[in-house]
C-alpha cells in the first residue's frame, strides 16, 4: 500500500522509499522483486532521456459487439481511461535505446488487465509498418493477461492481424524483439509474443498459454516448481534471456546495436525524469 | 446411422419417438404398423424442426461439441479421394489430434489438414482435438510442403483449445501456434478453412487464417469458452447462456461481423442427425470455395488475404503492403 514512505515490497515486505523505487526502477533492492510498470513508466525506463514520440494516441475501442456483462463495456472503458489517463492498454512510440532507433509498443496491465483487443492490434500493425518503412527494429513490450473478451471474435482476429504484420516484417528482414513482463498470458497474447526473433523476459514474470489452475484441474498432478515463470522458460529453451530491469536498457542497446550494426552511444545515465510509480495509481 | 452415444437433454423428445419407432420395427409387418411408423417418422421431423428453430445460445454450443457430431475424418472419407496421410513433426512426435495429408477434392489436388477429434473409443487418443506443440509443428511442416508443391490448402477447424498440460507449455505451445499461424497467413498458395465444430481461441485461429473461411451452421468460433467469460466477467459460471449470447459465436453472427465468409447449411437437427447429408453440403461448399480462391495470381491473392485481416477491428491508413512474392511452381 502507498504510504508516506512509499510502499512495501509485495514479496519480502521491506519498506520501499519513493526515492528507492525511482533509483531501482521499482525493483526491490533487497529481494529483487520486480513490481509491475505501466506503459509510461516502462518507456521512461527504457528509452534515452526517458523521452519518445507517441503515435496513434487517439485510438480507442469502438465496442464492436455492444458488449455488456454485469456492466457495459463502455463503462469499463471509461473507468479504465479515467484511472490510467490512457485511451487503451498500450502506447506506440518512436525513440532510441542507447542511441539505436527503435519502434516500440508497450502494453499497460493497469488498463483492463492489458487485454489485447482492436486498439493494441491496430497499434502493433501500424508500428510494425513504421518499422518496416524506416527499417528500424520493432520492440514489443508485453504486459497482458490475455484477450479482450468484450470484443469477442474481433479480439481473437487481432492475433491474425498482428501475425500478418509481423510476417511481413519478417519477410523484409526487420528485427523483432519481444520483452515479456509480468504477466504475459493467454493464447492470443502468446500467439503474438512468441513469434519474435529474440525474446527477453524480466525475472520471475508469469508467461504461459493455459492458466495453471486449468492444467491442474485437467491433469490432477501438481505443477513443477517455477512453472510458467521466466527462468523455467529459459531452462526449457523457450526464451533467449532473463534480464534484470536495471540492466535491460544496456542489454537491449548492445543487442540492437549489433543486430542493426549501428554504433550505440556509450551507456549514459538513465533518462530523466525519474520513473514515477505507475503502480501507485488506482488499478481497475 | 451410428447409434447415439451421448444425447443432449433437449433432444430427449426425439429420442423417445425414436425408441417407439425402434420398438415398432420389431413387430410383424402389417398395414397398421406401416401407418403408425409413417406417423411417428413425420412426428420426429416436426419435433426436430420445432426444437432446432428455437435453440438457446447454450444449446447451440452443446451441438458444436456433440459427441455424435461428425469429425474431420468422417468428412475426409466422404469428400476426398486419393488421400494419403502424412505423420510427424520431424522433431518430437506425431500428434493424432492433427490429421494431415494430400488428396483430391473434386478436380482439386490439395493438402487437407485439421483437428480430428476422433469418435467413440478413438476420442481419447485424439484428445478431442486438443493439440500439442508437435501437432502445430506437423501442421506447419505440411503447410510448407503445400507451398513447395504449389498445392492449395483445405483446413478443418475443430478444437476446444490446445492441450492443457505441463508438456504442451514446456514444449512451447505458444511458439508453435505463433509459427503455424504466421506460416498459414504468409502462404503463397490458395487457402480455404472450414469450421466444423468447436472453434476455440488461438488454437483454432492458427488453422483459420485463410483466403476463404467457411463455417457450418451449428459450429462455434470464440475467443474464450463461454463459461470462462461467465466466470471472469459475470463472476458466475452459471451465466454461460448470457455470455454465449454476448460473445456472438454462431455462424450467422460471425458472417455479420465479417470474420467468416460463408455459413454452410446443416441438415435439420444438426450434422449429427444426418451426417451423410452434412458431408454432401460441405463438399459442395468446399468445391465452390476452392474454385473461387484458385482464381488470380498468388500476389493478388496474398495481398487480398492480408488486407482482409488488416481491416479487422480498427482500420488505419493504407500500409506499405507486401513486397512482390515469388511466383508459385507452374505460375508464369
Image (cartoon, coloured by chain):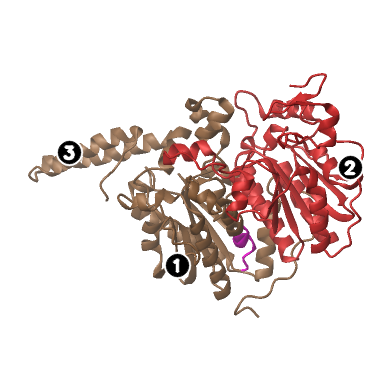
Chain colours: A red, B brown
The residue at the point 55 percent across, 63 percent down is B140
* Rendered view: B305 above or below A78: below
- Residue bounds of the magenta highlight: B182-188
Nearer to us: label 1 or label 2: 2
Along the line of sight, the residue nearer the viewer: B230 or A221: A221
Sooner in the amino-acid sequence: mark 3 or mark 1: 3
Dominant SS of magenta comes to helix
Query: Mark 1 sits on what residue?
Result: B101
Residue name at image x 71 percent, y 53 percent: B310
Marks 1/2: CA–CA distance: 53 Å
Could you tell me residue B6's position as x and y percent? 31, 40
Helix, strand or loop under label 3: helix
Q: Element under label 1?
A: strand
- Residue position for label 2: A50
Q: Quadrant of residue A166?
A: bottom right
- Say few, some or many: other residues with alpha carbon within 10 Å of mark 2 (under 14 / 14 to 19 / 20 or more): many
Of discs 2 and 3, which sits in the foreground?
A: 2
Chain that bears disc 2: A
Q: Is mark 2 on a helix, strand or loop?
A: helix
Amino acid at each position: 500500500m502507498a504510504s508516506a514512505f512509499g510502499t512495501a515490497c509485495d514479496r519480502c515486505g521491506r519498506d520501499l522509499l519513493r526515492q528507492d523505487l525511482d533509483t531501482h526502477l521499482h525493483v526491490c533492492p533487497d529481494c529483487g522483486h520486480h513490481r509491475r510498470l505501466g506503459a509510461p513508466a516502462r518507456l521512461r525506463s527504457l528509452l534515452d532521456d526517458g523521452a519518445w514520440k507517441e503515435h496513434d494516441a487517439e485510438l480507442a475501442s469502438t465496442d464492436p459487439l455492444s458488449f455488456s456483462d454485469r456492466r457495459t463495456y463502455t463503462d469499463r472503458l471509461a473507468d479504465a481511461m479515467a484511472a490510467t489517463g490512457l485511451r487503451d492498454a498500450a502506447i506506440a512510440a518512436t525513440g532510441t535505446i542507447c542511441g539505436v532507433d527503435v519502434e516500440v509498443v508497450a502494453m499497460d496491465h493497469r488498463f483492463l488487465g492489458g487485454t489485447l483487443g482492436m486498439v493494441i492490434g491496430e497499434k502493433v500493425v501500424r508500428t510494425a509498418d513504421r518499422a518496416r518503412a524506416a527499417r528500424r527494429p520493432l520492440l514489443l513490450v508485453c504486459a497482458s493477461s490475455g484477450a479482450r473478451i468484450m470484443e469477442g471474435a474481433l479480439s481473437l482476429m487481432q492475433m491474425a492481424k498482428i501475425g500478418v504484420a509481423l510476417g511481413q516484417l519478417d519477410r523484409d528482414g526487420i528485427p523483432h524483439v519481444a520483452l515479456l513482463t509480468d504477466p504475459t498470458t493467454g493464447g492470443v497474447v502468446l500467439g503474438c509474443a512468441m513469434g519474435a526473433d529474440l525474446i527477453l523476459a524480466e525475472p520471475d514474470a508469469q508467461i504461459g498459454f493455459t492458466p495453471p489452475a486449468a492444467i491442474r484441474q485437467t491433469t490432477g498432478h501438481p505443477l513443477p516448481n517455477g512453472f510458467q515463470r521466466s527462468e523455467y522458460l529459459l531452462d526449457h529453451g523457450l526464451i533467449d534471456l532473463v534480464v534484470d530491469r536495471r540492466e535491460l536498457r544496456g542489454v537491449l542497446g548492445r543487442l540492437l546495436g549489433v543486430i542493426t550494426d549501428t554504433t550505440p552511444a556509450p551507456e549514459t545515465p538513465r533518462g530523466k525524469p525519474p520513473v514515477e510509480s505507475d503502480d501507485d495509481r488506482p488499478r481497475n | 446411422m451410428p447409434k447415439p452415444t451421448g444425447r443432449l437433454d433437449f433432444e430427449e423428445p426425439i429420442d423417445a419417438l425414436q425408441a417407439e419407432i425402434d420398438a415398432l420395427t420389431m413387430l410383424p409387418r402389417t398395414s397398421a404398423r406401416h401407418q403408425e411408423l409413417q406417423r411417428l417418422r413425420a412426428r420426429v421431423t416436426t419435433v426436430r424442426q420445432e426444437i432446432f428453430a428455437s435453440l438457446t445460445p447454450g444449446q447451440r454450443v452443446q451441438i458444436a461439441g456433440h459427441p455424435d457430431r461428425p469429425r474431420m475424418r468422417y468428412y475426409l472419407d466422404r469428400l476426398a479421394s486419393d488421400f494419403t496421410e502424412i505423420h510427424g513433426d520431424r522433431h518430437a512426435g506425431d500428434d493424432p489430434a492433427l490429421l494431415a495429408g494430400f488428396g483430391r477434392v473434386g478436380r482439386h489436388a490439395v493438402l487437407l489438414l485439421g483437428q480430428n477429434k476422433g469418435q467413440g473409443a478413438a476420442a481419447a487418443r485424439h484428445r478431442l482435438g486438443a493439440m500439442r506443440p508437435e501437432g502445430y509443428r506437423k501442421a506447419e511442416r505440411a503447410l510448407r510442403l503445400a507451398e513447395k508443391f504449389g498445392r492449395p490448402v483445405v483446413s478443418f477447424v475443430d478444437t476446444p483449445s490446445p492441450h492443457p498440460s505441463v508438456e504442451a507449455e514446456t514444449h512451447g505451445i505458444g511458439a508453435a501456434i505463433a509459427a503455424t499461424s504466421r506460416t498459414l497467413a504468409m502462404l503463397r498458395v490458395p487457402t480455404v478453412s472450414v469450421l466444423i465444430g468447436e472453434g476455440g481461441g488461438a488454437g483454432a485461429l492458427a488453422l483459420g487464417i485463410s483466403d476463404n473461411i467457411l463455417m457450418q451452421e451449428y459450429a462455434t468460433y470464440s475467443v474464450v469458452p463461454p463459461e470462462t467469460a461467465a466466470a471472469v466477467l459475470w463472476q458466475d459460471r452459471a451465466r454461460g447462456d448470457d455470455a454465449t449470447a454476448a460473445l456472438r459465436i454462431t455462424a450467422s453472427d460471425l458472417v455479420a461481423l465479417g470474420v467468416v465468409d460463408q455459413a454452410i447449411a446443416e441438415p435439420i437437427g444438426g450434422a449429427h442427425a444426418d451426417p451423410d447429408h452434412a458431408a454432401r453440403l460441405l463438399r459442395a461448399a468446399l468445391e465452390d470455395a476452392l474454385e473461387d480462391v484458385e482464381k488470380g495470381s498468388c500476389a493478388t491473392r496474398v495481398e487480398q488475404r492480408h488486407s482482409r485481416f488488416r481491416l479487422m477491428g480498427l482500420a488505419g491508413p493504407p500500409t506499405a503492403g507486401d513486397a512482390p512474392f515469388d511466383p508459385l511452381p507452374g505460375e508464369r
